[in-house]
Image: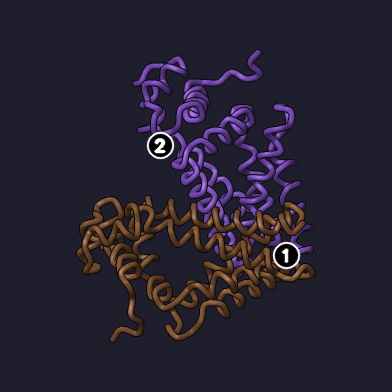
Chain colours: A brown, B purple
Amino acid sequence: MARWEPGARERLIVAAVDLFAEQGYDATTVAQIAERAGVTKSTFFRHFPDKRELLVAGQEALRRLLAEGIAEAPAEASPLEAVAAGLERASSAMGPMNHDLGPRLKAAIAASTELQERDALKSVSLAAAMTEALVARGVPDATAALAGELGVLAFKRGYAEWSQAAATDALAPYALAALRELRAASAALG
Amino acid sequence: MARWEPGARERLIVAAVDLFAEQGYDATTVAQIAERAGVTKSTFFRHFPDKRELLVAGQEALRRLLAEGIAEAPAEASPLEAVAAGLERASSAMGPMNHDLGPRLKAAIAASTELQERDALKSVSLAAAMTEALVARGVPDATAALAGELGVLAFKRGYAEWSQAAATDALAPYALAALRELRAASAALG
């Protein structure tokens, strides 16, 4: 019972992540991904130049959305309020496919050193995007770096919670709740 | 005028990082690294199984030192005081070679996507090591995750400052100053 009707691009991503989890990233070919998704190899290449870019594509969109949300937050917004605006903007782009992808991606990452590296680079890259967007708002360097890390932690923790919740839920409330929790936790740092 | 007398292991690391910066990680061979360091290939292989492990070796030691420092902090230490103890322990292992390596490593990382991924994985791995060590002390999950990220930021920012300073300085005061700065910055998050 499909709750959503994925297009070829979404089917390719889900098929790739499942194959990465089952047999590893290195062992998975474009031909296998296309076959699992029920499309031709040329359809794959209309969407992605290679299997690596299939993973990177989402990251670039996420960077852009986080930075845009922060840039367009009201001038009087605090650094964390701006980060919250970035998380809301990025969350709005996360639909049912992203919801269902969560546990699968986790399994794939656990099974592959290469995907662990990619995932680590993604975290660092998203933090840098938020930090830069905050610095552009005039937030001091150290505060911006810290807020960027908090933003990534909140996004990851919120996404993990959301993956366990009903598919009809939106991501944003989970990400924002995680950000509030981390903010509260910072009072207990000592 | 060498300020320190490096052994073969240190010379291999410096030679490798310089070659990575000059010609990229992928294009650099073990034979080239050994030649630049003035040792034989078999000397290389007595120290490292391959060029990749040459970069990973330091990371494992760092993880261990950070975790040990946190585990052995006094029971009454706050999460950030425990992180400070971890930073002190890890800093004590950083000598003149690490000081001189800073700018070279930065250049090598800027020149190679593969090294950017490795560096990102290193950050994530060090944060995880600190987070786990804090959770083992009974620190709640969110606070531990946040303190772990603060620890990595402090280590990286302190290391960067130290690289610009006199080689006779110790790293620890720079890392601890960066941690205090980040702690103060968290008050301005909003």
Q: Which residue occupies the extreme top position in the image? A: B1
Estimate the x, y position of residue A25 in percent, counting from the top left.
30, 54
- Relative to A9, residue A2 above or below: below
> Which one is in front, B111 or A159?
B111
Callout 1 secondary element? helix
Estimate the x, y position of residue B80 in percent, counting from the top left.
69, 58
Give the residue at x 48% y 21%. Answer: B8
**Residue denoted by label 1:** A79
Assess disc 1: are there few (<14), some (14-19) or many (≥20) residues with their C-alpha within 10 Å of its C-alpha.
Answer: many
**Residue denoted by label 2:** B52
Q: Quadrant of residue B44?
A: top left
Residue type at the position of mark 2 = Arg
In three-dimensional space, the C-alpha distance between marks 2 and 1, rounded to whole angstroms, equals 38 Å
Residue type at the position of mark 1 = Pro
Q: Are marks 2 and 1 in contact (CB under 8 Å)?
A: no
Estimate the x, y position of residue B154 in percent, counting from the top left.
67, 49
